[in-house]
Amino acid sequence: MSMIRTENLCKSFHSLEVLKDVSLTVEPGEVVCIVGPSGAGKSTYLRSLNGLETINSGKIWIDDVLIEDRDKGSHVNKVKMPKQQRLAILLELGMVFQRFNLFPHLTALQNIMIAQTKVRKRGEAEAREKAESLLRRVGLSDKINEYPSKLSGGQQQRLAIARALAMDPKVMLFDEPTSALDPELVGEVLNVMKKLAEDGMTMIVVTHEMAFAADAADRVVFMADGVIVEQSPPSEFFTNPKNDRLRDFLRRTLRKEE
């Protein structure tokens, strides 16, 4: 049983083809890192999974449930299901963005509680208990009453991770979670993500952090020009790339990290 499966995903913005027949399967507990040059379609792929972008054609399964089935040229989803059922399935996906997307007028505690009470319909006491537990988990217990503006970039991103985890997702999607951070703050966020991976969370991570991909991923996927060019375990991906485009990408990227 797969946790995420896509078949022949296509997405265009006007005349620009961003995803071209992208097929990928992610198993429960698997950590998949997606890497590639800017404009490869990596972020659009993630946003297509959770409905932030509407695909033009293709199929999407979440936790083995088909939620999108669109034929080329029709743009109509052939899967008919009640809105609440679809929402419940999409809530299985937690999302962490580049830019944190925290509520600036709410404290750290309130940022984690609000979706629990509004969407999951949890009581205040239960939501608070879970929020406090997650703040401890990401190392922010001492920031419980701070507003986002008083937190560093790394702390804000850790808070964003805690907020996503509060919804009890089965899959965590990370869209370049460290790209907006100063270099010295990157490690604290990656450490939280590594711990999640060790705890068995299914994760799809769009990242430019090659060391993280090598260390934490079960599989690394290279995307370029809207297609999956190559994918393999890190040990093979970084030491024995088969595709010339990937070899060139790794040569340039790893040189920058040295």
Image (cartoon, helix red, strand yellow):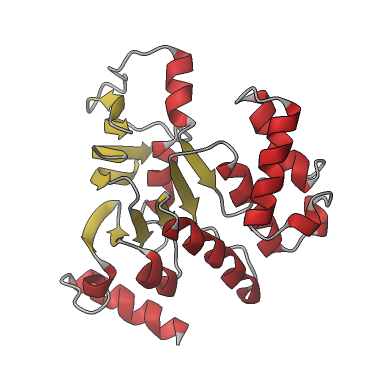
Q: In this view, does 131 lie to the left or right of 228?
A: right
- The quarter holding residue 11 reads top left
Q: Where is residue 101 in the image (x, y as percent from the top left)?
A: 66, 46
The residue nearer to you, when weighing 97 against 31, is: 31
Q: Relative to 104, say whether 61 is above or below.
A: above
- The quarter holding residue 104 reads top right
Q: Relative to 211, say whether 130 is above or below.
A: above
Q: Can residue 112 be seen in this view?
A: no
Q: Is residue 130 visible?
A: yes
Residue at 71% x, 25% y: name it. Answer: 123
- Which quadrant would the C terminus be assigned to in this image? bottom left
The residue nearer to you, when weighing 28 against 147, is: 28
Q: Where is residue 107 in the image (x, y as percent from the top left)?
A: 80, 45
The residue nearer to you, when weighing 206 against 136, is: 136
Q: Is residue 100 left or right of residue 46?
A: right
Residue at 69% x, 33% y: name it. Answer: 127
Q: Relative to 180, say whether 107 is above or below.
A: above
Q: Position of residue 214 (x, y in %)?
A: 36, 72
Residue at 35% x, 39% y: name it. Answer: 12
Q: Is residue 46 left or right of residue 74?
A: right
Residue at 75% x, 56% y: name it. Answer: 141
